[in-house]
């Protein structure tokens, strides 16, 4: 298929039926967002920057500044640099060498903060971003955590899925900035109001009311702050996996399905597999796989690294533990939201 440029390549990713396990009853389809040029958030960068260009908010010659430790940075670099803008990426020491090389090679200026802020690395990056905004007062900030163009970018993803399989009963996706799951779910609910939406998060992430653990090893999902783009009203359940479980799931995804992905995809895979054992044969489950594995060759896919972090065994429970929404969890667990905001401490969902 011929494209005029790399921005046009973004989207229309493959939908793949997974093999799963002998316990699976329902059907799981993986939406391979990892096959965008750099990853799932290429969609967000494209939607956000092109919309800002059309509205006049982003004028020719204006710099673009964004905070990201992963795929959003690459998406902004791809779209922004293609359109001739200077791009500044604020990140932290967790950035992997491959992502750093991509950003530098695309012509970005990369700013790495040295210490965590009071709310983890995200707050430290935002502090540095504010400094850059003062230095470049005419700069455009895509604001991935609060810009409504983030979830809006996934309307096309939903349409692509519906064109392929016509019906979705359960949607499973990881949550970081909140845009992909919230945007895709909202769009799919127009086709099926009874759609069940399952969020996947990391233990030690505050998004769904857990205490913050900034030292968690998982990247790409979870957060030390709650982004405005997380729409709790469309989410029915949340699953949390710890680092060991997420790493093990990612390695199983590569071994069993031959999909070389990151831990966001691995965690979503494990939850989708379990859900497939809990439903009827005609149930269609769609799992969003956002990230490729190349960023994790020195961590998840590195035996020495796993050994250093005490993750040699990499065991996964046979099934998650059902808990009250207000419970503190340390291993694979799930809770019911059904549209309830988890930060309402008076709420107890049974």
Image (spheres, rainbow, N blue to C red):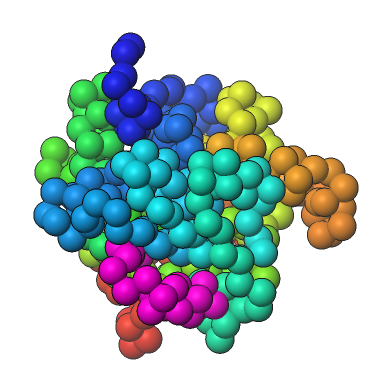
Quarter of the view holding residue 143: bottom left
- The image shows residue 38 at horizontal and vertical percentages of 48, 38
Check the image and report above or below for 229 versus 319.
below
For residue 41, side relative to residue 124 (left or right)? left
Task: Give the residue at the far top of this rendering.
Answer: 1
Q: Is residue 142 magenta?
A: yes
For residue 325, side relative to residue 261 (left or right)? left
**Looking at the rendering, in which quadrant would you find the C terminus?**
bottom left
Q: Residue at x 65, y 78 (%)?
A: 115
For residue 24, side relative to residue 312 (left or right)? left
| Whether residue 299 is visible | yes
Q: Nearer the viewer, residue 197 or 231?
A: 231
Task: Give the residue at the far front of this rendering.
Answer: 61
How many numbered discs?
Answer: 0
- The image shows residue 6 at horizontal and vertical percentages of 37, 29
Q: Residue at x 62, y 49 (%)?
A: 100
Q: Is residue 192 magenta?
A: no
Check the image and report above or below for 11 versus 205.
above
| Whether residue 186 is visible | no
Q: Nearer the viewer, residue 305 or 101?
A: 101
Q: Residue at x 28, y 69 (%)?
A: 138
Check the image and report above or below for 339 versus 300.
below
Q: Provide the residue span drawn in magenta.
A: 123-146
Q: Nearer the viewer, residue 232 or 96?
A: 96
- The image shows residue 181 at horizontal and vertical percentages of 33, 51
**Looking at the rendering, in which quadrant would you find the N terminus?**
top left
Q: Nearer the viewer, residue 23 or 221?
A: 221
- The image shows residue 275 at horizontal and vertical percentages of 45, 42
Quarter of the view holding residue 308: bottom right
């Amino acid at each position: 298929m011929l494209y005029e440029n790399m921005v046009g390549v973004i989207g229309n990713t493959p939908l793949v039926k997974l093999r799963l396990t002998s316990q699976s009853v329902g059907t799981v389809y993986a939406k391979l967002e990892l096959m965008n040029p750099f990853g799932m958030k290429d969609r967000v960068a494209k939607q956000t920057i092109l919309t800002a260009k059309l509205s006049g908010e982003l004028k020719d010659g204006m710099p673009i500044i964004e905070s990201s430790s992963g795929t959003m940075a690459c998406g902004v670099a791809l779209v922004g640099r293609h359109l001739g803008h200077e791009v500044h990426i604020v990140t932290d020491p967790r950035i992997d060498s491959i992502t750093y090389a991509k950003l530098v090679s695309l012509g970005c200026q990369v700013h790495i903060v040295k210490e965590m802020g009071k709310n983890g690395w995200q707050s430290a990056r935002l502090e540095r971003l504010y400094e850059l905004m003062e230095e470049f007062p005419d700069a455009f900030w895509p604001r991935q955590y609060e810009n409504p163009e983030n979830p809006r970018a996934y309307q096309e993803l939903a349409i692509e899925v519906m064109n392929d399989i016509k019906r979705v009963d359960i949607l499973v996706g990881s949550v970081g900035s909140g845009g992909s799951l919230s945007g895709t779910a909202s769009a799919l609910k127009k086709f099926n109001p009874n759609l069940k939406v399952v969020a996947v998060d990391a233990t030690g992430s505050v998004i769904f009311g857990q205490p913050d653990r900034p030292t968690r090893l998982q990247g790409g999902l979870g957060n030390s702050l709650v982004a405005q783009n997380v729409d709790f009203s469309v989410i029915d359940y949340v699953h949390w996996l710890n680092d060991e479980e997420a790493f093990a799931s990612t390695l199983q995804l590569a071994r069993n399905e031959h999909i070389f992905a990151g831990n966001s995809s691995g965690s979503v895979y494990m939850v989708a597999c379990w859900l497939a054992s809990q439903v009827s044969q005609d149930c269609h489950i769609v799992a969003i796989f956002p990230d490729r594995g190349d960023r994790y060759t020195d961590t998840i896919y590195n035996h020495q690294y796993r050994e250093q972090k005490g993750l040699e065994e990499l065991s996964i429970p046979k099934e998650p533990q059902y808990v009250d929404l207000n419970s503190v969890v340390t291993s694979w667990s799930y809770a019911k939201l059904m549209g309830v905001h988890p930060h309402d401490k008076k709420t107890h969902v049974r």
